[in-house]
Image (tube, rainbow, N blue to C red):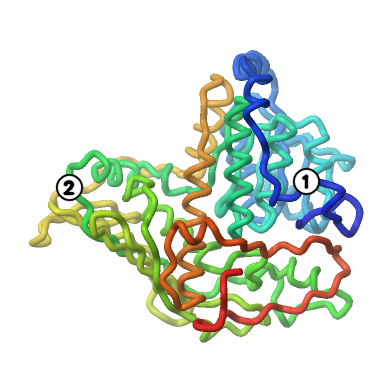
Amino acid sequence: MLLSKHGAHRMNQQRSRREFLTSGAAATLLAGFPNVLRAQTENRVLKIGLIGAGSRGTGAARQALNADPNVKLWAIGDLFPSQFTSCFKELAAMKNKVYVSPTRCFSGFDAYQKVLASGVDVVLLTTPPAFRPLHLRAAIEAGKHVFAEKPMAVDIAGVKSVMESARLAKDKGLTLQHGFCWRFAPGTRAGYGKILAGDLGRVISIYGTYTGGVPKPSTDVSERNPEWSDVEWQARNWMAHEWLSGGPLIEQAIDTVDKMAWAMGDVAPIAARGGGGRQLRDDDGNVWDHYEVTYEYPNDVVCHIGQRQFPRCFSEVVDRVICEKGTMMAPDRVHIKDAAGKMQWAYRGDPADMYQICHNEWFAAIRKGEPLHAGESMANSTMLGILGREAAHTGQRITWAQLWEANQDFAPDEFNLSDSRPVSPVPVPGIYKIC
């Protein structure tokens, strides 16, 4: 487990994500609860809690505050209190909606619990993804509407926990919105809509890329304070450590993986195989910096994902969905060409902020009491990323069924911010194993 109320967390003090909820009885007890929620939220002020006050969290807070006229930011939680200053600075222009008093700024590993207990109605979960399963479980059990930034987990145990939390959210009539942002972009919605409607015939293959430089860490290795423990340092430089970020195929390129799932109608793949390695990263972490993964789907459809974080190299983020009657390319200029390369269609609509649309639709669903249950699809897309990562790391062909049976859990059972934690070895194909 990743967070505790006071220092070290012990398994007998609180539910672990390895435990699964029995939601059948809960569904019976909660019959009619969605109507109660609707009556409670149609007109009143909704208090927002932000859990994770970094740049993405601050952006999500801004979008949430812009999504509804009758909301206020009520509480903020982050592992490090230094994040609050930059968050408030970025939200200064929205001060008429920011009602966070100093007594509702919570730091430490138990900050999420304090935010949930502060009287909020909705929460934004935007910490590093290792914390997502625990935070989501706690938020749903507390009866909160949730926006969960992608990815949803970094390991198999985390995805299974997210699936159970999603079922509980549905039973309780709570909205659960995801942060797979391209599913809200009008252009990509139009292009993928044509594929799913069958306008281009059967999908034959997909090649999605996410190549670029190494993202700047929140704290560079040269900036490590010698007083910081291993756990604190790794939390500050979380993108470099797989147990916190899941690695770049999960943390960064998961949008490309999700769009592959979207084009395939969110059906389950058969298996994956792949390769990659760690070639140019110069941090002290253990994540790879490039992947090439092939996913096998039913009806002999083969999909490829290329991810790379190399400085001073060619970069692109492009989806190529190759179908019987043409190829759709996205996301920057969504268009379709036939086999001869002749333009058949291009999106001509006005540009729109996909992040804002995501929150607009979420708050509209909350106000109307409409179901918004994105939990299963967001968990499956995260699991697709893990499938590709594990196939590459092991050097093996791994089936979808085998992955779900694996017992992978990166989270330590107990620790605190002052703990030592050696960096795990960089995965070596042929030697590394999932469990």
The tag on residue 273 is: none
Query: Visible in this render: residue 344?
Result: yes
Quadrant housing the N terminus: bottom right
Find residue 87 and report its horizontal and vertical position in percent. 72, 51
Q: Which residue is mark 1?
A: 15
Q: Residue furthest left?
A: 340
Q: Where residue 392 appears, x then y in whole percent?
A: 46, 74
Q: Position of residue 412 (x, y in %)?
A: 76, 64
Residue 212, by quadrant, is bottom left
Left or right of 211 on screen, residue 362 = right
Mark earlier in primary sequence (1, 2): 1
Q: Which residue is mark 2?
A: 200
| Element type where label 2 sits in the image | loop
Q: Position of residue 168 (x, y in %)?
A: 63, 33
In-front residue for pair 380/192: 380
In depth, the one of 261 and 224 nearer the eye is: 261
Q: Amino acid at mark 1?
A: Arg
Asked if 170 appears above or below 348 in the picture, the reply is above
Q: Is residue 26 left or right of residue 182?
A: right
- Mark 2 neighbour density, 10 Å: few (under 14) some (14–19) many (20 or more): some
Q: Residue at the spot x=59%, y=65% of the render?
A: 246
* Three-letter amino acid code of the residue under disc 2: Leu
Is 396 rendered above or below residue 269?
below
* Quadrant in the rendering for residue 408: bottom right
**How many angstroms separate mark 1 from mark 2 (CA)?**
48 Å
Residue at image location 33% in from the left, 66% down from the top: 304
Residue depicted at x 74% and y 66%: 235
Question: Which secondary structure lies at badge 1?
Answer: loop
Q: Name the residue: 61% across, 85% down.
A: 282
